Image (cartoon, grey):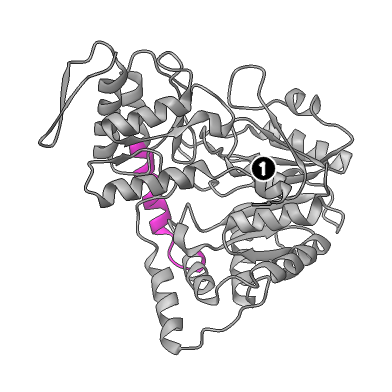
Amino acid sequence: MSLSLIGKNVAVSVTLKLNQTFAILKEKGEPVIHLGGGEPKSLAPIDAITAISSHLNSGEVRYAPVDGTIDMKKAIIRYTREHYARVVEPENIVASSGAKQALMVALQAILDPQDEVIFPTPYWVSYPEMVKLCGAIPVPVTPEDGTFTPRMSDIKQNVTSYTKAIIINSPNNPSGAIYPASFIKDIVEFCEKKGIYLIMDDIYHKLVYNGVEVANPFDYVKDFSDNSKLIIINGVSKAYAMTGFRIGWAIANKTLSFAMANIQGHQTSGPSVLLQKAAIGAINGVQSSTESLRMTLENNRKVLIQQIKAFDGLHLLEPDGTFYAFVDFSAYDKDSTRLSNFLLEKVRVLTMPGVEFGMEGYLRISFCGSTKDIIEGIERIKWAIDPNSPNELFIGERKLVRDWN
């Protein structure tokens, strides 16, 4: 079969593929534990459910404007005012079918073939492939100091005449690192000076712990004209536990937003009016569910850190945000794909291999499930890879016997 260059070169989303594997095993009755999840287990806010139910009962479910309904944009304006202390106009906003689509149409609107896009390592698995879908070149940048936090020197030495954009994801998936305000200030000012687009993927910005604050990029922007290169990506998936509702948005200059809406209009048209109603309900409604989720995750984070610290040979830079920990397992196996597959096969624990996030030897472990799953999952992992573990392990009534070294 003849495929395009893009069709041949864009890789499968490993996170989605592993999620499918988990679902199949669970359907078969296997005692699987999901420590690789990217969605909170909380229910969607009641205001979201009420809003969507009310509109559904009306029977008036029609096409939406390609860049979002007026009410959706009003909700995003309110959200931006409350969380970024910045008033934007409706023409600055494109509502999309998830933050992923908002990011994708932003890249399609600004990139030409052979343009380069820089992003720090570790990175969300889709960044390189999304850049490739535009015919552009992904440029991952690994911090030289061995941390998960980039420095401006790391960024600058990778900037070339082909650099069109820099993507910053803080809090970061998969590491949970929150980049310091000094770095955000410097990267905003650098991009303004060089005329490089700065894409801030802020989808986790409300899920932070220990009183750590996420820097607001608008605090450092000097150019608010239609020449502004700042693009903010956000959505309701994570903080509102509304992953399946698929509503996200971008905030950008008016010319870029217009181009993004045109592209989206030819791809999917506007996001579902029903799902926009739910997102509006969540944003405008009582916010207690978001804080409740954050507090639950903060407790889960403490449990996971305790489990990891009691596990000899593992190394962890504690996450300050998101619901992930990026754990160095290289003392046991430097091949993260092999290790992840081994853990799923032998003890039915799903983790995400670090190589997919740009760093080999690591596993991404999620703490958005139950504390029971976290504790039992780490216990199973320890039994599987620690040579000092007993020869047998019981999972319910099933007895496992170590038949490997």
User: Which quarter of the figure has residue 367?
Assistant: top left
Instruction: Give coordinates of residue 58: x percent, y percent.
Output: 45, 89
- Secondary structure under the numbered disc 1 in the rendered image: helix
| Horizontal side of residue 120 vs 176, given as left or right | right
Q: Position of residue 40 (x, y in %)?
A: 39, 50
Looking at the image, which residue is at 35% across and 59% down? Answer: 43
Q: Nearer the viewer, residue 116 or 132?
A: 132
Q: Which residues are magenta?
A: 283-300
Observer-nearest residue: 322 or 345?
345
The correct choice, above or below, for 298 with respect to 236 in the image is: above
Q: Is residue 196 left or right of residue 69?
A: right
The count of marks equals 1
Q: Position of residue 113 (x, y in %)?
A: 82, 46
Please give left or right for residue 110 compared with residue 214 in the image: right
Residue 181 seen in render = yes
The reply to whether residue 218 is in sight is no
Seen as rendered, the residue at the extreme left is 397
- Position of 373 compared to 255: left or right? left
Magenta: main secondary structure equals helix
Label 1 amino acid? Asn
Q: Quadrant of residue 405?
A: top left
Magenta region includes residue 319: no
Picture residue at 32% right of the left edge, 25% below the top = 306
* The stretch drawn in magenta includes residue 284: yes
List the residue tagged with mark 1. 9
